[in-house]
Amino acid sequence: MNLWSVTDRFIQERKILNNVSPATVKWYEYSLKAFQPVLEAEFEATALLKAAVIRRIGEIQEQGRGNKAVSVNTYLRCLKAFMNWAHEEQIVKEPFKLSWLKEEQKILPTLSPGHIKALVHWKPVHRSGARLHALALTALDTGMRVSQLLGLARLGCGLSEFYASGQRQGQQASTRTNER
């Protein structure tokens, strides 16, 4: 089965039936082109195609042009969409199953106890510094996001009850309580 010959039909159907954006069309073209050598080859079974795709993933990663797991998974997302479409159109007899590459999980840096102590004991010089200090301490105390803090109003805070309610437009209010 030579699948490269039907990639244009896939993209055209996506444009017409799914109303995808021009940027998505470019993404389809670019991602499918990454697997062009595999899609141009003739395969009798989906298992052979899967093995060729796995070899091609290895080649893409060895090219060393910044093709990390997240980039290859982006290509795979498009390839899976194409293969699901090919299965629905009965171009491919069996469904194409391939797992994602494991991506690096980045751990966001947090403040150390020393940083928190320095922030709490910092003495602002100007009024704008005092406002910033109050926002930082409120964020530390409640865990609210900056957008929620900036949207706070006097009606949304109860100092005697230790609560703050932040709400962004079009979303439900989130209430943070600090038990003392």
Image: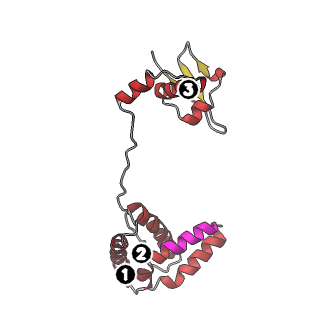
Residue in the image at 54% along x and 75% along y: 29
Residue range (magenta): 20-31
Q: Which of the numbered marks, if any, corresponds to residue 129?
A: 3
Tell me the amino acid under the disc marked 1: Ala
Residue 174's spot in the image, x, y percent?
56, 31
Q: Are marks 2 and 1 in contact (CB under 8 Å)?
A: yes
Judge from the rendering whether residue 124 lies leftward or rightward of residue 37; answer left or right. Answer: right
Q: Which of the numbered marks, if any, corresponds to residue 157?
A: none
Q: Nearer the viewer, residue 132 or 79?
A: 132
Distance CA(mark 2)–CA(mark 1): 8 Å
Secondary structure beneath disc 2?
loop
Secondary structure beneath disc 1?
loop
**How would you classify the magenta stretch by its main secondary structure?**
helix
Residue 175's spot in the image, x, y percent?
55, 27
Residue hosting label 1: 45
Distance CA(mark 3)–CA(mark 2): 64 Å
Q: As drawn, which residue projects farthest toward the top?
A: 160
Q: Is residue 87 visible to the viewer in this orientation of the structure?
A: no
Tell me the amino acid under the disc marked 3: Gly
